Amino acid sequence: MNTAESNATAPIKKDDTHSLLNWVLLISCAVIWGFSYFLIKHSLDGFEPMEVAGIRMFSGGIVLLPFLYQAFKKIPKEKYFWVFVCSMVGSGIPIYLYPLAETHISSSVTGIINSLTPLFTFLIGILFYRLKNNYLKLGGVLLGLVGAVCLIVFSPNVSFAGDLLFFLVALSVPIMYGYSSNVLKKHLQGLPSLPLTSLMYFMLLIPASIYLYKIGIYTKITHDEKALHALPYGVLLGVFGTAVAMSLFNILIQRTQIMFAASVTYLMPIVAVFIGFVDHERIAWYHLLGLSLILVGVVIINKVKDTKD
């Protein structure tokens, strides 16, 4: 057998398989979270932003309950504090803050702010978690950020008007995401993903249930036809945009570099562009530029290994 034939029939190396799976997980998270904006849009046809956030949290917590028993068995009690931190900082608070911020700033501004997540993940890792300041990786982070901003800034009907206070509210979210990702990587490494995610959202299920009860969500659903029609979108948002996506993200962040996992926010605008293309929207030059910069940036981030000082 010659060399060419030998290479063609050789089994895939374990590292290559792991790398491929990491990309599949990253793209899956990006697709689910990117498509979540479609579900949010239709949920808002019948509910207020804060109500959508409550339904999302409640639905995500309910669907993960079957894995809660395994969580109590497999997750050490001394890890519960960090699980609670991740649940609140990585999901609970941000899900309510973004709808609050968007009452005074545009979704375009929110999209750009959300794209800062990998940068804050990198900075927090350097400042508090002994992540080495690799300038090539930082270059990949900034390149991806520029690409994401291109997709948003040049899009039609973009508005940058808004209130400074609510701009700061939105800015706190990627900071929380960055901190939560570092906590997951540092303190919750090696824990089984589904039980971990189940415990995280069980901690959020109780306050979400109380909130929905207090605002009379059941009465609204049974008496408001628009709310009833919008409910399936809110439930799907919780099941897929919260429970499934976060479970996959927890697997990804344990398998790979923290910056590679955080770059999912760069890929989400690509999903939005694709959905727009399917919906007969035109692909413009800035789409191609932004997509190219994002992909190159993510590849650079993936190639440079995370190291500690």
Image: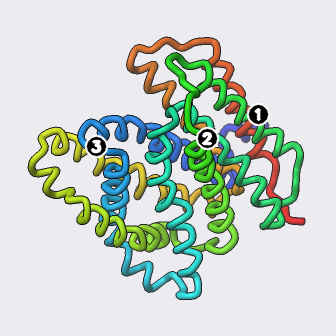
Figure quadrant of residue 175: bottom right
Residue ID at (57%, 49%): 169
**Looking at the picture, which amino acid does disc 3 mark?**
Tyr
Please state which of residues 204 and 130 is positioned toward the viewer in this rendering.
204
Is residue 202 depicted above or below 126 in this figure? below
Residue ID at (54%, 74%): 83
Q: Which element is circle 3 on? A: helix
Q: Which element is circle 2 on? A: helix
**Looking at the picture, which amino acid does disc 1 mark?**
Leu
Label 1 to label 2, Cα distance in Å?
26 Å
Query: Is residue 22 visible from the viewing direction of this image?
Result: no
First of labels 3, 2 by sequence position: 2
Kindly identify which numbered label has been placed on residue 143: 1
First of labels 1, 2 by sequence position: 1
Please state which of residues 158 and 271 is positioned toward the viewer in this rendering.
158
Left/right of residue 195 with respect to residue 291 in the rendered view: left
Q: Could you tell me residue 29's position as x and y percent?
A: 51, 47
Figure quadrant of residue 216: bottom left
Kindly identify which numbered label has been placed on residue 123: none
Q: Pointer 2: what residue?
A: 164
Is residue 201 depicted above or below 147 in this figure? below
Q: Could you tell me residue 190's position as x and y percent?
A: 61, 73
Q: Pointer 3: what residue?
A: 233
Label 3 to label 1, Cα distance in Å?
34 Å
Label 3 to label 2, Cα distance in Å?
31 Å
Q: Which element is circle 1 on? A: helix
Is residue 3 depicted above or below 257 in this figure? above
**Looking at the picture, which amino acid does disc 2 mark?**
Leu
Please state which of residues 169 and 41 is positioned toward the viewer in this rendering.
169
Is residue 117 depicted above or below 192 in this figure? above
Query: Is residue 210 visible from the viewing direction of this image?
Result: yes
Q: Could you tell me residue 276's position as x and y percent?
A: 44, 22
